[in-house]
Amino acid sequence: MTGHAKGESVMAQQMPVSGVAGGAKVPVSLRNDSPASSIHVERARRELLRAAMDAVEEWVVVVDAQGGIQFLNAPYAEFLGVEASEVLGRDVSEVIENTRMHQVLESGRAELAQLQLIRGHHMIAHRYPIFRDGVLIGAIGSVLYHDTWEWRQVNAQVQALEAEVDYYRQALETPTGARWQLSDIIGDSPAMRELACKVRKIAPGGASVLIRGESGTGKELYAHALHRSSARAKGPFIKLNCAAIPEALLEAELFGYEEGAFTGARRGGKPGKFQLADGGTLFLDEVGDMPLAMQAKLLRVLQDREVEAVGATRLVSVDVRVIAATHRPLEALVESGEFREDLFYRINVVPLKVPPLRERRDDLPTLATHLLSRLARRSGRRPPILSEAALERLCAHHWPGNVRELENVLEAAFYLGGSHIQPTDLPDAIGARHGDARHGDARHGATHQSDLSTPASAPESSTTARELHTTPVTLREAMAQAERQLIENALRAAEGNRTRAARQLGIAKSSLYEKLNRHGLLAETP
């Protein structure tokens, strides 16, 4: 109904109020321009509030600062077997068993979703302190679930909803196959910011990308991010590790085969990775390990954008963006004839280099925290805290295995340590020699810890048995130093001719190139 108060139209409601004339409608008017009407309005409001509290299924009790009951709604009183009006002023502990209202009054802190045993029933209750002008004046408690069965029902519904959300989320992501985007990659060092900026620039285009970097740096993450940030994001993202497929099966994996193409061929044939990636992205990991014969066929597909399956008699057009990755020195492989030069230029349209962990040490604390949190989520444990001493040792390590090695080290420390990871929880080799990493970075930013180089000014016979014995290095490092010295001696004897040096050392020329690159000698030799 509509009324007027101080010249303004207002709404008045009528509703049944329990205990008032058998539920008769009590008008709740907002007119308050006389003392009598003000008393009437206040009374009506109180009756309305009581009726509202009695109408809900939650059980509610309100106490004053001393714990005396000031309000108990009808459903709660009925369950307790008391009259609400008769318990007013009584101590709450005399009426409600196992109550913790006094503890809330003492602490001034709320208690949420707490189990409480009342009359043989386990219930879930909330308790809140009540403040006025910063002074504690009482507390309110409510029983949200009358037994644990109700809570299990609600929890089951929540879990079902979460499962449904996960299903649709996976349904959106599964067709593409790309799991990570650029924001998922941890790192805020200058090198990582520069790389992220470059990825954002090249992702929208369709040019082929070659991702370079050492093993364990996360090259695949950037392939995913490139796809997710491109116009092909809704298309498929197909992966193939060229080093993991036997040479005899690689052609069928890449280009597919027709029914009856060879003994054991699947009925109806099978599409290859190029056909599956049509309209999307094909990620060729470890492309440097692809056999020469397959390189020629891959080059033809990249040039013509057409695929011929094994046993097929016709070509099929495909629209695929190729992203390749490798940790091998492709330029050296091209020079040694193990990788086609024309294919190298075809896949190396836009090069990306993922920096090793030792070149972005500023990211190590953030990475460690992220990896420990992920381990905690998997195991259901609280994430441990990495002590300053342990972090110092991690930062001192050279990380030849990069982020993959860091993840393995932290996983071991996660299970061996307690709530705080100490240096004793880390493997003995981690950061044992603090000076090596820093010294190695100063000389060769990309030099492996186990491949330390000798100073250029040292004499030819600098690495003697006596020095190796007295220098505090591991066996692996000593062998690396000796290998480097032998390579330098062979190159010096061959007057810089790498083919002759490789022949003198009794190794293939491609192996020599890999060792030169690992020891940081590739740029120093002609």
Image (spheres, rainbow, N blue to C red):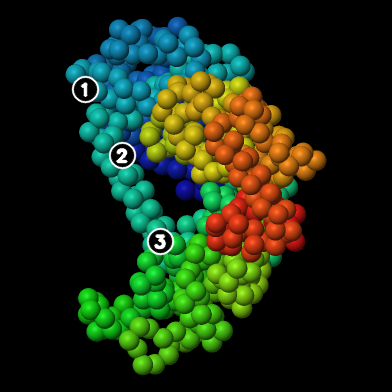
Disc 3 to disc 2: CB gap under 8 Å = no
- 492 or 262, nearer to the observer: 492
Mark 2 or mark 1, earlier in chain: 1
Give the side of residue 189 with respect to residue 482, left or right. right
In the picture of the structure, the residue carrying the numbered disc 1 is 121
Q: Is residue 368 visible?
A: yes
Residue 242 vs residue 444: left or right? Answer: left
Image position of 25 (left or right of 297): left
Q: Is residue 399 visible?
A: no
Q: Residue at x 34, y 44 (%)?
A: 158
Residue assigned mark 2: 155
Which comes sooner in the sequence, label 3 or label 1? 1
Where's residue 173, x and y in %?
44, 61
Q: CA distance from mark 3 to mark 1?
A: 60 Å
Q: Using the rendered view, name the quadrant where residue 461 is placed.
A: top right
In what element is the residue under mark 3?
loop
Residue 104 location, quadrant: top left
Tag in front: 2 or 1: 2
Mark 1 crowdedness (10 Å alpha carbons): few <14, some 14-19, many ≥20:
few
Q: Which mark is residue 34?
A: none
Q: 389 and 135: which one is in front? A: 389
Instruction: State the residue in front, 262 or 350.
Output: 262
Amino acid beneath label 2: Asn
Which quarter of the rendered picture does the C terminus lie within?
bottom right
* Type of amino acid under label 1: His
Q: Residue furthest left?
A: 120
Which kind of residue does numbered mark 3 sit on? Ala
Q: Which residue is mark 3?
A: 244
Position of residue 301 in the picture relative to residue 49 (left or right): right
Give x and y (percent) for residue 72: 35, 20
Q: CA distance from mark 3 to mark 2?
A: 44 Å
Residue depicted at x 56% and y 31%? 474
